Amino acid sequence: MINIAEIEKKLNSLNKFNLVFASFFFSLMTLCVKNIDKRIPIYELVFFRSLLSLMITLFIIKMKNINPWGNNRPLLFLRGFLGTFALVCIFYAIRNMPLSISTVIQYTYPIFISIFAGIFINEKINPNIFFALIIGWIGILVILNPTQLSNINVEIENVSLSIAFLGSICTAFAYVTVKKLAFTEDVYVIIEYFPLVSFITLLPIVLINWVTPNWNELIWIIGIGLFTQLGQTFLTVGLKNLPASEASTINYLQVLFGSIWGFLFFSEMININFLIGALLVLLGTIISTTKITKRT
């Protein structure tokens, strides 16, 4: 018999390592997305991911015998919508850009978190945030300037860039809602609403435009659902025990994992400009998330 309480106790004891595991599993999720043929629409991938995650989460909720609807339902639904929209944007960016670059853009979200956390959940905004923004965006420009992209034989459409940054902003909003919900909701109720809202929202679109996956694609789709579920679990527990901005800094490890997968599996070039740009983004993130304290 699975002892959910014992598992939760062990997860809480991991502290910051929860977020290391979350970054690792989310990076495996991006690897799965990148390996699926483009004939499968993005919204169908998000739908399958949501279906698998919802089934697993509802099973755990039933074992714990807790109310699946939670307390702050408006905020739970908002978290679900933000997560769904962010995931569609992220999947689109992963599919249409090099994995290493799409991951770097996605992980500009910690800087946005520092701003949103100050506005919405009463975390004091670091006075260095504007300095951090400048450094972070210089890093992005170093990576995305035409000369750099030409050197690594990469062409990126402006639409793909815009969608990638939109996904980052929505991710930041979603993480802030998770942090706020963690004070009143069970971890698995927070996790449940993400796939629940995605499933309800995308079901009509998927049924109208259905594309049947082959067996190879189905394996990668199952991987998306499994690794996302593991990532969400470790992430939610980690956010519950740490300030949202501090936690997001650790999550930046996904850039490292994503760059490794891009190099190993898709022969993506990583040159000195990319490394400098990524380090600048990381530096901006660290500056923006230091000395965050609660307002009294």
Image (cartoon, rainbow, N blue to C red):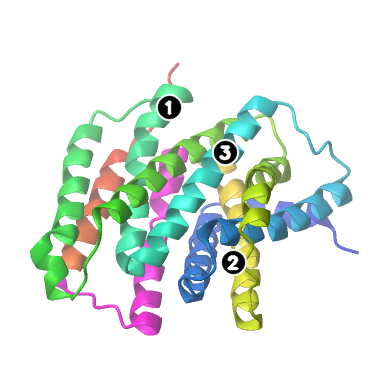
Circle 2 residue: 224
Mark with earlier residue (3, 2): 3
Toward the left, the furthest residue is 147
Q: How many marks?
A: 3
Mark with earlier residue (1, 3): 3
**Looking at the image, which residue is at 33% across and 80% down?**
263
Amino acid type, label 2: Ile
| Magenta-tinted stretch | 244-272
Mark with earlier residue (1, 2): 1
Secondary structure of residue under mark 2? helix
Circle 1 residue: 123
Q: Is residue 268 above or below residue 258?
A: below
* Mark drawn on residue 81: 3
Question: Which quadrant of the figure has residue 132?
Answer: top left
1 vs 2, front mark: 2
Task: Determine the CA span between mark 1 and mark 2.
Answer: 33 Å
Along the viewing direction, whichever of 108 and 1 lies nearer the viewer: 108
Task: Determine the CA span between mark 1 and mark 3.
Answer: 23 Å
Q: Is residue 262 magenta?
A: yes
Secondary structure of residue under mark 3? helix
Amino acid type, label 1: Glu
**Looking at the image, which residue is at 51% across and 59% down?**
42
**Looking at the image, which residue is at 34% across and 61% down?**
102
How far from the left and from the top, in percent, is residue 56? 76, 58
Residue contact between numbered discs 1 and 2, judged by CB atoms under 8 Å: no
Q: Residues within 10 Å of mark 1 (few under 14, many from 20)?
A: some
